[in-house]
């Protein structure tokens, strides 16, 4: 990658992209905090980096409307600090928040443990501005929650990994800060018991915001980070709740009664500072990149425990967002070559395929990427996505090669 261009305004950004489209036609790579540039395919060599960190202004914060409009290069920790002054938040867990930017987080559609209770970016981005490959600044949605005209460009650009437009400004819907939160940390002997307990919790009278299952060294790692002396013989079901102190108390009591009949070995409350550490550890696990390869399998929630059991038998560390059917897995250090990693993945990919799911590689040695199923098996929507890319970016200038093979 060559020297970065760092626009100070959206107009400057649009002008730069337009000049490139009419002239050199170099591939452009938009970057925010550079925390996820290795996520997906590597992209083309010699791309011009467009660094969004100069676009970091807060445009409008009408707190009483519970919305905020900011430029895309604003860091996540800065955004959350601002929102806390009004006791509000964006309730999406974003790893490496001291570096990641709101534009990059939306471009990768990242989410974490609270996804079960609060949803994903597609539920919160109500307005978006972006610059297309021709250098045209375009907008979708608006600054108010009720606006429904036209195509939903907010949802299209969310998760597009900078391949359809360079996101320059967004309007987000907000939620109030939870007064307090806590977890029940529940070790089990076998996955089948966890599955039965999860079946009960999906109909719980309580409203948990996180249903996480941890197994293999993920349970040790995350327990250590929480610094609460938690037992980590796997598998562990970890249930997170939020609300007023009374609501949290009531939910913990309710959950305890609901989980107890399913063979749980212990039910430990995690509160206060330890609960904060635990939220962070659950959010950051997917980015702890010492392992040779991190993958994400998307499955029917009802097949996740079976998948996790098979993965743990292969030595994989596993974090399951159990209510959403997402499994994050990290291969053991022994998978030191691309052949070993492919062998370890092959049965899990097959399992995911049979369970009508998919398995993508999030992170691995850059030299392995050309042989890895980075985006998983071909999906029925891919031809449509290629057509869309072709019509919005006919010369393939925006992040070529990063997403599928567009
Ligand atoms: C190992 C690992 C695993 C991850 N797993 C997941 C996961 O499972 N699911 C998930 O959704 N996220 C995942 N992420 C992403 C995530 O958590 C990021 O930290 C964050 O979302 C990206 O923000 P950033 O500002 O650092 O973006 P960057 O790393 O700078 O960029 C990320 C991507 O977005 C593009 N981009 C950046 N800014 C813009 C912009 N303004 N307009 C258009 N495109 C832009 C970049 O070109 C790049 O393709 C993972 C990250 C890592 C390191």
Image (cartoon, rainbow, N blue to C red):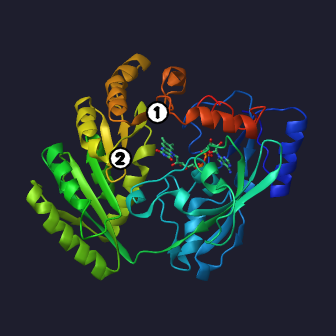
Residue 290 vs residue 329, the one in the foreground: 329
Q: Residue at x 61, y 36 (%)?
A: 384
**Measured along the vertical axis of the image, is residue 373 above or below residue 100?**
above
Real-space CA distance between mark 1 and mark 2, rounded to the nearest whole angstrom: 16 Å
Residue tagged by mark 1?
361
Question: Which label is found at residue 325?
Answer: 2
Residue 323 drawn at (x, y percent): 33, 54
The one of 304 and 235 positioned closer to us in this rendering:
304
Visible residue check, residue 69? yes
Q: Position of residue 177 (x, y in %)?
A: 46, 75
**Position in image of residue 164 (x %, y %):** 69, 43
Residue 399 visible in the snapshot: no
Secondary structure found at label 1: strand
Residue farthest to the front? 149
Label 1 environment density (alpha carbons within 10 Å; few <14, some 14–19, many ≥20):
many
Quarter of the image holding residue 346?
top left
Rendered residue at 21%/54% (across/down): 199
């Amino acid at each position: 990658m060559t020297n970065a261009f760092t626009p100070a305004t959206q107009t400057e950004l649009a002008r730069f992209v337009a000049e490139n489209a009419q002239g050199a036609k170099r591939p452009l790579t938009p970057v925010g905090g550079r925390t996820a540039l290795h996520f997906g395919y590597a992209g083309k060599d010699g791309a011009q980096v467009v660094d969004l960190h100069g676009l970091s202004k807060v445009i409008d914060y009408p707190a009483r409307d519970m919305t905020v409009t900011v430029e895309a290069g604003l860091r996540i920790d800065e955004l959350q600090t601002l929102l806390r002054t009004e006791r509000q938040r964006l309730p999406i867990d974003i790893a490496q928040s001291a570096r990641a930017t709101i534009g990059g987080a939306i471009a990768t559609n990242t989410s974490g443990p609270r996804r079960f209770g609060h949803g994903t970016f597609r539920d919160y981005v109500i307005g978006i501005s972006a610059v297309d490959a021709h250098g045209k600044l375009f907008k979708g949605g608006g600054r108010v929650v009720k606006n429904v005209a036209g195509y939903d460009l907010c949802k299209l650009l969310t998760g597009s990994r900078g391949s359809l437009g360079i996101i320059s400004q967004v309007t987000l819907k907000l939620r109030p800060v939870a007064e307090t939160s806590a977890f029940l940390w529940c070790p089990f002997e076998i996955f089948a018991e966890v599955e039965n307990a999860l079946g009960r919790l999906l109909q719980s009278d309580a409203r948990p915001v996180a249903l996480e299952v941890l197994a293999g060294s993920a349970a040790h790692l995350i327990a250590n980070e929480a610094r609460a002396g938690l037992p980590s013989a796997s598998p562990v079901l970890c249930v997170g709740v939020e609300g007023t102190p009374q609501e949290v108390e009531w939910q913990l009591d309710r959950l305890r009664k609901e989980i107890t009949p399913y063979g749980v070995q212990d039910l430990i409350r995690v509160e206060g500072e330890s609960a904060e550490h635990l939220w962070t550890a659950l959010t950051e696990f997917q980015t702890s990149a010492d392992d040779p390869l991190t993958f994400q399998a998307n499955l029917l929630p009802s097949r996740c425990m079976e998948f996790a059991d098979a993965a743990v038998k292969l030595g994989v560390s596993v974090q399951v967002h159990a209510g959403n059917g997402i499994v994050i897995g990290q291969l053991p250090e022994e998978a030191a070559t691309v052949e070993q990693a492919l062998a370890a993945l092959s049965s899990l990919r097959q399992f995911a395929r049979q369970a009508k799911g998919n398995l993508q590689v999030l992170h691995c040695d850059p030299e392995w990427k050309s042989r890895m199923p980075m985006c998983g098996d071909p999906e029925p929507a891919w031809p449509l996505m290629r057509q869309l890319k072709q019509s919005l970016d006919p010369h393939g200038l925006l992040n070529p090669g990063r997403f599928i093979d567009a």
